[in-house]
Image (tube, coloured by chain):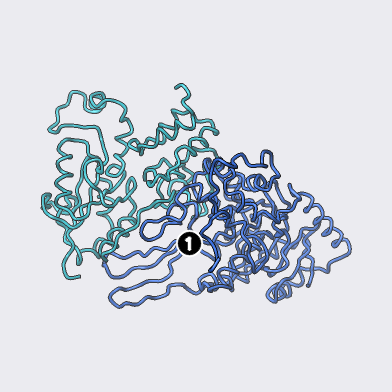
Chain colours: A cyan, B blue
Amino acid sequence: MEEKIKIGFYALTSCYGCQLQLAMMDELLQLISNAEIVCWYMLDGKSLEDEPVDIAFIEGSVSTEEEVELVKKIRENAKIVVAVGSCAVQGGVQSWEQDKNLEDLWKTVYGDGKVKFQPKMAEPVSKYIKVDYNIYGCPPEKRDFLYALGTFLVGSWPEDIDYPVCLECRLNGNPCVLLERGEPCLGPITRAGCDARCPAYGIACIGCRGAIDYDVAWFDSLARVFREKGLTREEILERMRIFNAHNPKLEEMVEKIFGGESQ
Amino acid sequence: MRYVKLPRENTHIFLERLKEWGKLYAPVKISEKFYDFREVEDVGKVEFHYNRTIMPPKKFFFKPREKLFEFDLSKQEYRETIRGVEPFVLFGVHACDIFGLKILDTVYLDEFPDKYYKVRREKGIIIGISCMPDEYCFCNLRETDFADDGFDLFFHELPDGWLVRVGSPKGHRIVDKSIKLFEEVTTEDICAFREFEKKRSEAFSYHEDWGDLRYLLELEMEHPMWEEESEKCLACGICNTTCPTCRCYEVQDIVNLDGRTGFRERRWDSCQFRSHGLVAGGHNFRPTKKDRFMNRYLCKNSYNEKLGLSFCVGCGRCTYFCPAGIRFVRNLRTILGLEERSCPSKIVEEIPKKGFAYAENIRGEDV
């Protein structure tokens, strides 16, 4: 590789768990000879935020006016923008209550406290700028990060994940918590890649990697199954929204099953 | 064929002896209701009367996830990573699953041999076991309910032990090595075996002819069943991944962060997934959930010329493990006209016939 690839890692409103997860990878050492880290505050305090990079990784949801400006600047500076983690990709759990108004949410969290920024409702990065690739999860998987970065390094384009967690439950031979115990597992609509970590421990998937794109997340079919198992419309919507509050199809597809029943 | 009897009291001793032939895998209970083939330490845990394992035995030969080789871009070379496969014993395989492996053989051995599959197939010892069908079983309709070959030994349950059919030279050696555990088959045993087989064949839910099924499926592409049932489908792929004969896989190259070395991996795929029919340029051969749903029905019911059977062996997994409660057999019987409201199918005129069977542009040369 003649020229070093320039990488930036930027954080919006989040727990910083995504970058921590990635910063702790031993494999990063392999990267040093191929890449120059222009901006990654967790690794280097002398990071430069407003510099051109080849690949910009962004974690966190856009939750302040200042962050709207920041993501636009990152887009201008970067050849490839990668949204990292459920906050950046889907708006995160902080989008769960998006039906409520900002002032009430603000008061619940901060009371009368004063802050130096202008808050907004949490939103995914793609709402403001074009995102070229997504790395999913809360936090993301090391494997996905390695795969994406490694593929970029050889000048190719990584594949997106368009199949559900159920595949990985089967690859690992887990029992099925949805079928056997009637638990509201979101595995069938959620992107794989986590190796079905939660179901492997007998815990129903809560969908942290977000609903599959390409119109293949069948909220309606799963709502039908949940309904047969005794869940109400509200319980179903509540659960599916945890990590999918901004999904434009969710509500409509669940409503299809409940056929406009009164609330 | 050689027949011997293993008295019940010797069963566990024999299982223990089997470990001398390789790692022993057998059906065990993995959760409240489900079974799976797992490595067995304590032979007391082996289940002789399990209904079906959640994962079919194909997992031992065609690995769910497998590294194929490592590569180094700077040297333009690759290195195979398959390690020495040790012999192993798979005890307690039902007849349908033995047929499942025979079907995989026709694809992975007879066409272009898949070396990863082949090496494991050569090392695997298969010991079959008889079973009583539950309401999900329909192997009788698939003619896969009794295995003639494809096993080293086959255990048929008797009131006081097992009538063992010896199906291979290795089977002979296994029996001979523990010959003191075995007895000769008596007249009573033969009667008991006949009785068992009679009871078994009567226990199936359906006794009917499915001979024209594959043609009816092609002719009934516009049947309302497809729409109704594919609506329910979660497209989770469990029907494929639990199927003993589904054999599609997806391949991915994973490059290390040195930007030079990496490996190629394959994993089981499902035709219910969007990317299964996706090709370069973004075209998708099966763009809708309904298309993908139909594909499995047509694929499973197509004709395996080598064996003269369908690709479905009637194990019942795709129904038993379907989280959406879709019933494969009922849907097939709808098409066969054996369920209610089948004939004529509701839609006849309004929607243009557009399935494979009606395609005008599929013709031979000069036709």
Q: Position of residue A55 (x, y in %)?
A: 21, 56
In the image, A190 versus B28, the foreground residue is A190
Which image quarter holds the C terminus of chain B? bottom right
Total count of labels? 1
Quadrant of the rendered structure where residue B80 is?
A: bottom left
| Quadrant assignment for the N terminus of chain B | bottom right
Residue A188, percent from left and from top? 46, 45
Residue closest to the eye, B347 or B206: B347
- Secondary structure under badge 1? strand
Q: Residue furthest right?
A: B187
Q: Quadrant of residue B225?
A: top right
Dot 1 alpha-carbon crowd within 10 angstroms: few under 14, some 14 to 19, many 20 or more: some
Percent across and percent down for residue B263 are: 37, 68
Query: What's the amino acid at mark 1?
Result: Tyr
Provide the chain ID for the residue under circle 1.
B
Residue beneath the point at 22% across and 51% down: A81
Compared to B354, does A185 lie above or below? above
The extreme top residue here reads: A262
Q: Name the one closer to the observer, A247 or A207.
A: A247
Q: Residue B363, relative to residue A123: is it above or below?
A: below
Q: Residue at x 71, y 64 (%)?
A: B147
Residue that badge 1 annotates: B249
Lateral position of residue A100 relative to residue A261, left or right: left
